[in-house]
Amino acid sequence: MSHTLGDPAPTPGARQAQKLRTRQALLDAALRLLAEQSLSSLGLREVTRAVGVAPTAFYRHFRDIADLGVALVEEALGSLHTTLVATLAATGEGDGEERIAAAVELIVAYVRAYPAHARFIAREQHGGVRRVREAIGAQLALFAREVAAQFAKEPEAVGWSEDDLLMLARMYVDHMVMTASALLETDDAGPVTDTARRQLRLVSLGRRHWLDAPPPADR
């Protein structure tokens, strides 16, 4: 960045702020471009052209497009961890109607507020960029561990093994992803949310009677 003779040079803080703004602009531009294509087909020059910076500027922020994709995964899912666990903790123990309704509403609110991020995760979860698939898988696995830890605190978890609690948590997380994907495909959220609540009631019923079932032979 140039400056006029006699003007003070940019401070380190100002340079860092500009760097962060450029990085965010690259992420935002990529997300807009990904509305119509997959990450594997996105070109680096497309992104820098949309931001109005030279292609070389891209490498000050990301190693390659896959690195940018991993950053988008963190941006899309990172803030949900605290919200999800807080929602479960605030709606009591077990799987009553309050918890079911709150879990579904959390997904609806997320898709409404961040449709581009939700679409990116839904598409790239099984997309062609391995590092991004792995990053999404790692985030979802972390969600599952956090949900399992919350379930373990509840009286209904007495007698459950850690593996079974994690299996239950993964069902909840998979259900969230599936519901978000369904919401992206419709303008009428009603039928999707009705189905989502019914599915969680079915999971709840299974949870209540899980320990009543005879254990499989390999347990």
Image: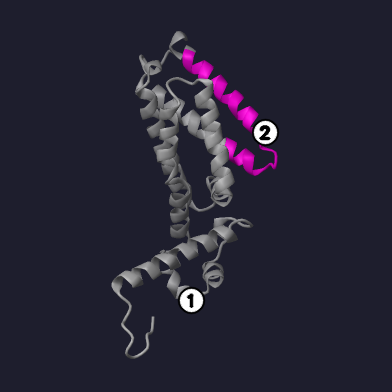
Q: Secondary structure at mark 2?
A: helix
Q: Quadrant of the C terminus?
A: top left
Mark number, residue 54: 1
Question: Is residue 9 located in the magenta-colored stretch of the structure?
Answer: no
Indicate the position of residue 56 as horizontal and vertical percent values: 44, 74
Q: Secondary structure at mark 1?
A: loop
Q: Nearer the viewer, residue 190 or 26?
A: 190
Amino acid type assigned to the residue bearing label 1 in the image? Ala
Q: Nearer the viewer, residue 193 or 210?
A: 193
Question: Is residue 185 located in the magenta-colored stretch of the structure?
Answer: yes
Q: Residues within 10 Å of mark 2 (few under 14, many from 20)?
A: few
> Which stretch did the figure color magenta?
179-208
Residue 219 seen from this side: no
N-terminal label among 2 and 1: 1
Q: Residues within 10 Å of mark 1 (few under 14, many from 20)?
A: few
Give how far apart the Cα atoms at labels 2 and 1 are: 45 Å
Amino acid type assigned to the residue bearing label 2 in the image? Gly
Mark number, residue 190: 2
Q: Quadrant of residue 20?
A: bottom left
Q: Nearer the viewer, residue 128 or 60?
A: 60
Question: Left of 56 or right of it: where is 35?
Answer: right
Indicate the position of residue 175 as horizontal and vertical percent values: 54, 32
Residue found at the very far front of the displayed protein: 7
Question: Left of 184 or right of it: where is 152?
Answer: left
